[in-house]
Image (tube, rainbow, N blue to C red):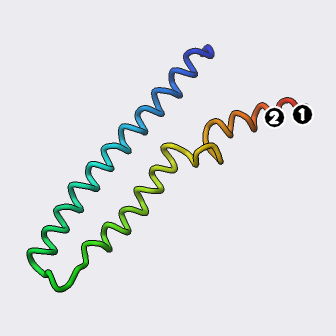
Amino acid sequence: MNNENIQYEKARKKVEMIKWFYGDIGLYIVINLGLFLLNILTTPDDLWFYWVMLAWGIGLAAHAVVTYGLGGVLGDEWEERKIRELMDKK
């Protein structure tokens, strides 16, 4: 595989990850809106929907970190810089 094919494949995988992340955000919104309405309509004195939102939100945040990295802290750019740095030392 030449360099262009490798770059294309990495970009394709990244786009696929982003697509799944957007789908998860949409699902999070729809399901939690439904749970909110269910909670308000059935037991308005006992609010429980936010626990689901919180737990699922933590998972969604983890998915965001996997998809987008930590903004340069441990993302793809950091990885490339570190590889170049280690290769230059030899």
> Type of residue at label 2?
Glu
Discs 1, 2 touching: Cβ within 8 Å? yes
How far from the left and from the top, in percent, is residue 69? 55, 45
Q: Which quarter of the rendering shows the C terminus?
A: top right
Q: Residue 10: x and y, percent? A: 53, 28
* Residue 74 on image: x %, y %: 64, 46
Q: Can you tell which quarter of the image residue 23 is in?
A: top left
Q: Quadrant of residue 60?
A: bottom left
- Bin the neighbour count of mark 2 within 10 Å (Cα to Cα): few under 14, some 14-19, many 20 and up: few
Residue 39 appears in which quarter of the rendering?
Answer: bottom left
| Total count of labels | 2
Indicate whether 76 appears above or below 53.
above
Q: Amino acid at mark 1?
A: Lys
Q: Helix or strand or loop: what does disc 1 sit on? A: helix
Q: Which residue is mark 1?
A: 89
Please tell me the numbered disc located at residue 85: 2
Residue found 81% across the figure and 34% down from its top: 85
Question: How packed is label 1: few (under 14 Cα within 10 Å), some, or many (20 or more)?
Answer: few
Give whichever of 24, 50 is nearer the camera: 50
Which quadrant is the N terminus positioned in? top right
Left or right: where 57 falls relative to 41 = right
Residue 17, labelled with which disc? Answer: none
Extreme residue in the right direction: 90
Question: Up-down: is 11 above or below 72?
Answer: above
